[in-house]
C-alpha cells in the first residue's frame, strides 16, 4: 500500500514538471511581425524559370545617360578589341612658321625636325658681340696658347727637347735630328688679322656663290688640300693663306711620296705661298710622310711653306673642348676654327654643315662640295662640334654662313 502511494506521488510530480515546462515554452514564443512591403522601385523581380543561381541577385541600376560631348561612339563592325577605347582628340594644327616640311623622296638619313630646330637658332638676327668675342679669345689664348704654340718652331722647341705624340702613347721623339725642319720662328709673329674666312669642305658650299666673299677676307684658312680652281672657284674662291694637309691624303693620292713626286707638286700650285699645316706628330706613322712632303717642297723650290702642328697645342685644345663635352678626336675644321678665333678679330665660317640635307632647300647633299666620298664613321663628333660653333654664332663670337652668299651677308 505504501509503495503504491509512492509511485502515485512520483507520477504526479512528473506530470506537474512537464506541465510547467510546456506552459513556459508556449508563453515565450512571440509571433513574427508581418513583412513590410517594399516600394515598387526596390522590388526584386522573381528570377525567370530555369535560371539557376539567380535568386537573391539584385539587378544593376539603370545607367546614367552621358551628355552628348562625352558619349563614346560604338566601335565599327569587325573591329576586335575596340570596345571601351576613347578616340584621340583631333591634333592641334601647328602655325605655319613651325611646320616641318616632309623630307624629299630618296633622302636617306634626312633629319627634318632636327634641322628645323638648328635653323630656328641660326635665323635669329646675328650681331657681333665684341665683349663675348674678346672673352672667348682670351680664354682660348690662356688655355690653348695657339697664338704662340700652334706651330712647332725653333723658338718654342729647342734642340734637345722631346716631342710627345698627342694621338697615341709612344716613346717621346727627340727633335735633335729634325730640328732644322722646324720653322725658324712663329709664323704668326704676334699679328692679328681683322677678318678671317675658315672654309670647310661640306657639300653645302655647292652652288653657294660664296667664292668672292670668302676671298675678300684678309686671311683664308682651308682644310685638307681641297680643290679651289675651275668649276669650284665661284662657290669657294681660291685665296689661301693656310691649308691643312692630312698625311692620309699623301698616302691615298700620291703613294706616300715614295714614287713620282711631280703630280703632288703640280697639285700644290693652287695654294701659291700659303702655309701648309702638317700634323706630323699626332701619330708616329704621320712623321715620315710629313717629312717627305717637306723635303719634296724644298727640292722643287716651291713657295709653299710647310710647318708642323704642335702636339702640345693639340693636347691643350682637346682638353679645352673636352671640358665642354666633346670627347671624340677633334676634326680639322674645329681645330682651325679655334685657331682662327685666336688669330682674327672677325671669324666667318663657310662649308660647316654636318647633315646630308640642305637646311633651306631640303635637298640631299654630297659629303663634300667636290665629291661624295663618305667620311670615316665615329671618328669625329661632327653634329656635336657644329652645335658648339652654332652657340658661338648665337653669342656673336663668330658668324656661320649657310646657303647662298650675298654682298650684305657679312
Image (spheres, grey):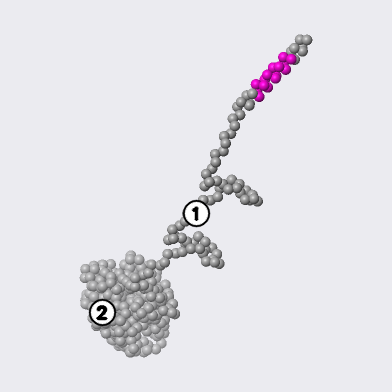
Horizontal placement of 342 versus 373: left or right?
A: left
Q: Secondary structure at mark 2?
A: helix
Residue drawn 66% across and 24% down?
22
Residue under label 1: 63
Instruction: Determine the image quadrant of residue 66.
Output: bottom left
Q: Are marks 1 and 2 in contact (CB under 8 Å)?
A: no
Image: 299 above or below 338: below
Q: Which mark is residue 24?
A: none
Q: Which residues are magenta?
A: 8-22
Q: Which mark is residue 409?
A: 2
Q: What separation in Å lies between label 1 and label 2 (alpha carbons)? A: 70 Å
Between circles 1 and 2, the one closer to the viewer is: 1
The percent coordinates of residue 2 (x first, y second) are: 76, 10
Depth check: give the residue in front, 161 or 362.
Answer: 362
Q: Could you tell which of marks 1 and 2 lies nearer the N-terminus?
A: 1
Horizontal placement of 11 versus 345: left or right?
A: right
Image: 395 above or below 28: below
Magenta-drawn stretch contains 121: no
Residue drawn 25% across and 71% down?
396
Crowding at label 1, few (<14), some or many (≥20) Cα neighbours within 10 Å? Answer: few
Task: Assign the N terminus to one quadrant of the image.
Answer: top right
Magenta-drawn stretch contains 12: yes
Task: Assign the C terminus to one quadrant of the image.
Answer: bottom left
Residue drawn 71% across and 17% down?
12
Amino acid at each position: 500500500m505504501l509503495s503504491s502511494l509512492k509511485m502515485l506521488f512520483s507520477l504526479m510530480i512528473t506530470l506537474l514538471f512537464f506541465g510547467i515546462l510546456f506552459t513556459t515554452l508556449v508563453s515565450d514564443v512571440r509571433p513574427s511581425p508581418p513583412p513590410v512591403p517594399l516600394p515598387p522601385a526596390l522590388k526584386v523581380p522573381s528570377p525567370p524559370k530555369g535560371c539557376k543561381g539567380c535568386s537573391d541577385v539584385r539587378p544593376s541600376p539603370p545607367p546614367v545617360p552621358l551628355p552628348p560631348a562625352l558619349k563614346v561612339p560604338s566601335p565599327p563592325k569587325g573591329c576586335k578589341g575596340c570596345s571601351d577605347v576613347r578616340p584621340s582628340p583631333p591634333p592641334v594644327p601647328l602655325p605655319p612658321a613651325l611646320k616641318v616640311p616632309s623630307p624629299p623622296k630618296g633622302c636617306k638619313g634626312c633629319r627634318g625636325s632636327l634641322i628645323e630646330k638648328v635653323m630656328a637658332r641660326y635665323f635669329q638676327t646675328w650681331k657681333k658681340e665684341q665683349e663675348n668675342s674678346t672673352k672667348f679669345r682670351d680664354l682660348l689664348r690662356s688655355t690653348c696658347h695657339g697664338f704662340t704654340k700652334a706651330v712647332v718652331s725653333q723658338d718654342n722647341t729647342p734642340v734637345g727637347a722631346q716631342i710627345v705624340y698627342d694621338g697615341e702613347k709612344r716613346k717621346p721623339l727627340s727633335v735633335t735630328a729634325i730640328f732644322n725642319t722646324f720653322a725658324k720662328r712663329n709664323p704668326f709673329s704676334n699679328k692679328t688679322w681683322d677678318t678671317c674666312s675658315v672654309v670647310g669642305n661640306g657639300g653645302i658650299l655647292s652652288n653657294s656663290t660664296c667664292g668672292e666673299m670668302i676671298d675678300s677676307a684678309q686671311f683664308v684658312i682651308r682644310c685638307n688640300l681641297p680643290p679651289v680652281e675651275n668649276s669650284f672657284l665661284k662657290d669657294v674662291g681660291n685665296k689661301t693663306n693656310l691649308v691643312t694637309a692630312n698625311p692620309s691624303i699623301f698616302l691615298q693620292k700620291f703613294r706616300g711620296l715614295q714614287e713620282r713626286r711631280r703630280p703632288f707638286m703640280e697639285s700644290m700650285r693652287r695654294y701659291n705661298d700659303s702655309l701648309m699645316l702638317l700634323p706630323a706628330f699626332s701619330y708616329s706613322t704621320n712623321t715620315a710622310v710629313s717629312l717627305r712632303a717637306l723635303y719634296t717642297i724644298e727640292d722643287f723650290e716651291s713657295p709653299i711653306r710647310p710647318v708642323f702642328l704642335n702636339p702640345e697645342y693639340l693636347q691643350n685644345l682637346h682638353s679645352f673642348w673636352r671640358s665642354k663635352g666633346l670627347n671624340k678626336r677633334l676634326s680639322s675644321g674645329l681645330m682651325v676654327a679655334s685657331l682662327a678665333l685666336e688669330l682674327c678679330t672677325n671669324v666667318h665660317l663657310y662649308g660647316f654643315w654636318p647633315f646630308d640635307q640642305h637646311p633651306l632647300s631640303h635637298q640631299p647633299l654630297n659629303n663634300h662640295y667636290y665629291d661624295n666620298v663618305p667620311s670615316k664613321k665615329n671618328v669625329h663628333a661632327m653634329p656635336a662640334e657644329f652645335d658648339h660653333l652654332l652657340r658661338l654664332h648665337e653669342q656673336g663670337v663668330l658668324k656661320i654662313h649657310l646657303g647662298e652668299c650675298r654682298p650684305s651677308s657679312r
